[in-house]
Amino acid sequence: MAVKLRLTRVGKTKQPQYRIVAADSRSPRDGRFIEIIGQYNPRQEPSVVNLDADKAAQYLADGAQPTERVAKLLQIAGVELPAKVAAKVGGPGGKADKIEKKAQKVEKKAEKAATEADAATAAGDDAEAAS
């Protein structure tokens, strides 16, 4: 059985609150779960995360895979994540790094296009001056 640490939505319509649960990966989002290990309330300012760090660490040690959001909440709560999970969330090689690298590539392409446009304009000006 593959165990996931994920969020389960509770609360009224348009007033979400979440439980952080350990559940079988095949069960539905708000369906069956093994154990509640914490709560997350994004509507309060600042967001509130109540978490049993010992239970979370035990599930991670046993091989449970947290979702991206739960992994971030675990980091906020101070739970040490396995290296594989930490890389996905925000460590080296994580999603944030990939987004940053993509932004740098786009920036380089824009600079290259600008320099080519400047060169083409300069060549056109030289041709008009020679005429």
Image: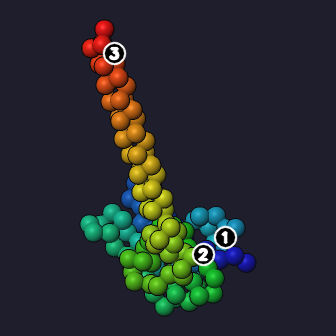
Residue 129 locus on image (x, y percent):
27, 14
> From the viewer's perspective, is 131 left or right of 34?
left
* Kind of residue at badge 1: Ser
Packing grade of label 1 (10 A; few <14, some 14-19, many >=20) is some
Quick one: SS at disc 2?
strand
> From the viewer's perspective, is 68 left or right of 103?
right
**Frontmost residue, 20 versus 62:** 62
Give the image's coloring scheme.
rainbow
Mark 3 or mark 1, which is nearer the start of the sequence?
1
Packing grade of label 3 (10 A; few <14, some 14-19, many >=20) is few
> From the viewer's perspective, is 108 left or right of 32?
left
The answer to the question of whether label 2 and label 1 lie on touching residues, with beta carbons closer than 8 A, is: yes
Q: Report the residue marked by disc 1.
A: 25
Distance of mark 2 from mark 1, alpha carbons? 9 Å
Distance of mark 2 from mark 3, alpha carbons? 64 Å
* Kind of residue at badge 2: Gln
**In the rendered image, the vertical position of residue 24 relative to residue 11, given as above or below:** below
Q: Report the residue marked by disc 3.
A: 127
Distance of mark 1 from mark 3, alpha carbons? 68 Å
**In the rendered image, the vertical position of residue 10 relative to residue 85, given as above or below:** above
Marking on residue 65: 2
Quick one: SS at disc 3?
helix
Residue located at (36% from left, 65% from top): 42
* Kind of residue at badge 3: Ala
Residue 18 locus on image (x, y percent):
45, 68
